[in-house]
Amino acid sequence: MSDVLNVLTRKTSLRKACRDISMAEMEKLAENLSEIIEERKVDEAARLEEQKEKLAKLETLKKEILESGLDLAEIVESLESTGSTGKKKGTVQPKYEIRDSDGELHQWTGRGRTPKVFQQFFDQGGSKEECLIK
């Protein structure tokens, strides 16, 4: 607990701390605390309302599941299989290929950074069209 909280929550400590504070400053402090308390009450009421709505939705879903005759395990399995990951990305087929001086075949999809072998070929005057896989 912080020192400020210790002072504010103990009446004796608060009295001692307020000895050197003017009445106007104490009234301003009380006004600020009242505003903070009201804000907290509004936030708490909103949180409780959200929680109540969520519980009502859960009860509705529970009722619908029981009426449908579906097993909860089936629903969970269905949700997991569809997932929220979206489409799975497949592999991209190479679009370019080139043989280096050793005769080794290098392939490239044309995406991302240009591989060194291809970059060296392009630097020597070669073009992408020459490397296209036909």
Image: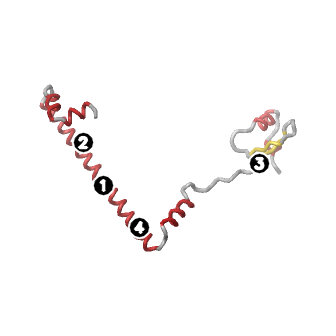
**Label 2, label 3: how far apart the Cα atoms are:** 64 Å
Q: Is residue 25 visible?
A: no
Q: CA gap, disc 4 to disc 1?
A: 21 Å
4 or 1: mark nearer the eye: 4
Q: Position of residue 33 (x, y in %)?
A: 21, 39
N-terminal label among 4 and 1: 1
Looking at the image, is mark 2 or mark 4 nearer the viewer?
A: 4
* Disc assigned to residue 95: 3
The first of marks 2 and 3 along the sequence is 2
Q: Is residue 90 above or below residue 98?
A: below
Classed neighbour count for the residue bearing mark 2: other residues with Cα under 10 Å, few (<14), some (14–19), many (≥20): few
- Within-10-Å neighbours for mark 3: few <14, some 14–19, many 20+: some
Return the residue at label 2.
Answer: 36
Residue 35 higher or lower than 17, as above or below: below
Residue at position x 83%, y 51% from top?
134
Which residue corresponds to mark 1? Answer: 48
Please report whichever mark, 1 or 3, sits nearer to the chain's N-terminal start: 1
Which is more foreground, mark 2 or mark 1? 1
User: Which amino acid type is shown beneath numbered disc 4?
Assistant: Lys
